[in-house]
Amino acid sequence: MRKFLYFIIILIILDLLAFGFLFFKMESEKQKFINNFEFQKKQLIYDVAYVLGLFARDKVLSESFPENVRNYLNELVRNDKNLELILISDSSGKVIFSTNVAYEGKNIDEIFSENITSLVDYEIKNTEDKVVLNMPISEFNKKILYLRIEYKRR
């Protein structure tokens, strides 16, 4: 009878070890999924910013900031509940377009604490409540625009 009890106890311990291993494996997979989701979200923000930057660069180089681009970007922010701000400044840092009209005409470095006009490459910052992308848009070796996108976390 004692051997049978030991056998049952060993089976229970083995089951607990197997369950613990599976639980650990599930938590590990869950963390991988979360990390992959965060990476994809950052990549999406960068891709949107890149396309917007190229679009805005071509328009700014050809004429003053056109009304149809302004309307398109405002509509983009209105339709996406998590997209808080799209801001474009010229090479001197003066804001030429913002979905927050109060920022237009001001210097971008006066509005935000980051020194955006000194960036060489794009920068993504994660805070608890939003993801912020700051990105210089260049033509050849000259920075001609700066783009800032703020995307709210859910």
Image (tube, grey):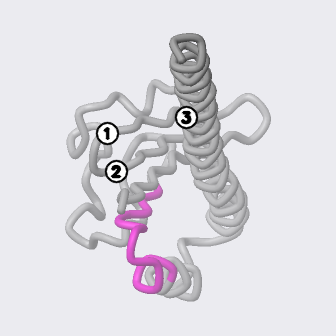
Between the C-alphas of marks 2 and 1, the distance is 5 Å
At 55% from the left edge and 84% from the top edge, which residue is drawn?
A: 72
Q: Are marks 2 and 1 in contact (CB under 8 Å)?
A: yes
Q: Are marks 2 and 3 in contact (CB under 8 Å)?
A: no
Q: Nearer the N terminus, badge 3 or badge 1?
A: 3
Q: Secondary structure at mark 3?
A: helix
The image position of residue 57, as x and y in percent, is: 67, 58
Between the C-alphas of marks 2 and 3, the distance is 31 Å
Between the C-alphas of marks 3 and 1, the distance is 30 Å
Q: Nearer the viewer, residue 63 or 139?
A: 139
Marks 2, 3: nearer the viewer: 3
Q: Secondary structure at mark 2?
A: strand
Residue bounds of the magenta highlight: 76-88
Q: Residue furthest right?
A: 140
| Amino acid at pointer 1 | Thr
Marks 3, 1: nearer the viewer: 3
The image position of residue 21, as x and y in percent, is: 61, 25
The quadrant holding residue 109 is: top left
Please name the residue that numbered disc 2 is placed on. Answer: 130
Please name the residue that numbered disc 3 is placed on. Answer: 23
| Amino acid at pointer 3 | Phe
Please name the residue that numbered disc 1 is placed on. Answer: 127
- Crowd around label 1: few <14 · some 14–19 · many ≥20 (10 Å): few
Q: Nearer the viewer, residue 87 or 131?
A: 131
The image position of residue 65, as x and y in percent, is: 53, 72
